[in-house]
Image (cartoon, grey):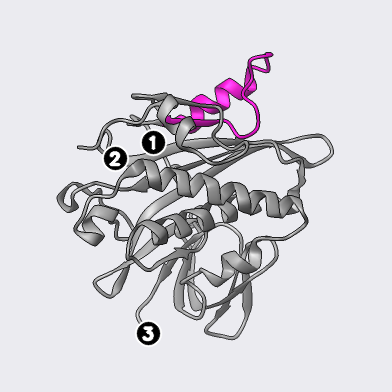
Amino acid sequence: MEKFLSETVVTHSLATRWLGKKCQVLPEVDSANDLLKEMVQQGSDDSPPAGFVLLTEYQRKGRGRLARHWEAPKGSSLLLSMLFRPNWPAAQANWLTMLVSLAAVEAIAAHTNLEAGLKWPNDVMVRQENSWHKVSGILQEGSFGGDGRLQWAIVGIGINVNIPADELPEGITPPTSLLAATGQSVSRLPLLCTFLERLEELYDGVGNGRSPQPLWQNKLITLGQPVRVTHHQTSNSFMGIAEATDSAGHLLVRDEAGKLHTVTAADVTLREK
């Protein structure tokens, strides 16, 4: 098993200017997102700055989108939550998840021979044995001010790195890890550094007025594919073709009757053609 990460090693290894330069590494937490949220909401002078990163080796109550449980053996994965204070308008709130998912795809591609892509809205996928498997999930939470702007946001990500195939949890989307997909263990520290360094570059680009949506859409494996859309509150579903996304990242699906739907929050599963 690879050595556990430490704050000193992480900060000294990073080539970023602000992202991750202040971080905390904990051996075990209930949820990194929840803990970082508590730290932010205390509102004291010790409140974490933008770019603060909380890493943990194990989450007892890790969760993903729609409150689904997410678990990984201790020391096997990259589990981290990052704090941003973007002050962006509400229409751009989803951009953070786009940026994080893009950085994850690029980091995985840089450290493995795997083809990586994105399944709408926030699953990082790798191609394994001619099919796509989920290797990472992302969860974004935040707070809007009275002016409707995003005051702060926490984005959590879990990347399955060195989980053996027989220890992977079950999921709606077939899961995998970088170890299971490549047959080789992957060092977590270089992967983490590449991820944070690329994320900082992408984030700073948005600060210069560039939307990440075109780059993010280009990585979506969902587009052009037959899909089933299931609304989690009503369980109602329909089938169609995923055609594109709009500027906010919503998925545009044309159903079998030719009607175009804007999907904002639902389970979207790929179907066999």
Which residue is labeled 2 in the image?
72
The amino acid type found where label 2 is placed reads: Ala
Which residue is labeled 1 in the image?
62
The magenta stretch is 31-55
**Which-is-in-front pick, marks 1 and 2?**
2
Nearest to N terminus: mark 2 or mark 3? 2
Q: Can residue 43 be spotted in the picture?
A: yes
Question: Is residue 53 part of the magenta span, yes or no?
Answer: yes
Q: Quadrant of residue 247?
A: bottom right
Q: What is the C-alpha distance between the residues marked 1 and 2?
A: 9 Å
Q: What is the C-alpha distance between the residues marked 1 and 3?
A: 34 Å
The amino acid type found where label 1 is placed reads: Gly
Q: Image point 59% across, 39% down: which residue?
A: 141
Nearest to N terminus: mark 1 or mark 2? 1
Q: Image point 55% across, 36% down: which residue?
A: 82
Left or right relative to 138: residue 213? right
Quarter the N terminus occupies? top left
Contact between marks 1 and 2 (CB within 8 A): the answer is: yes
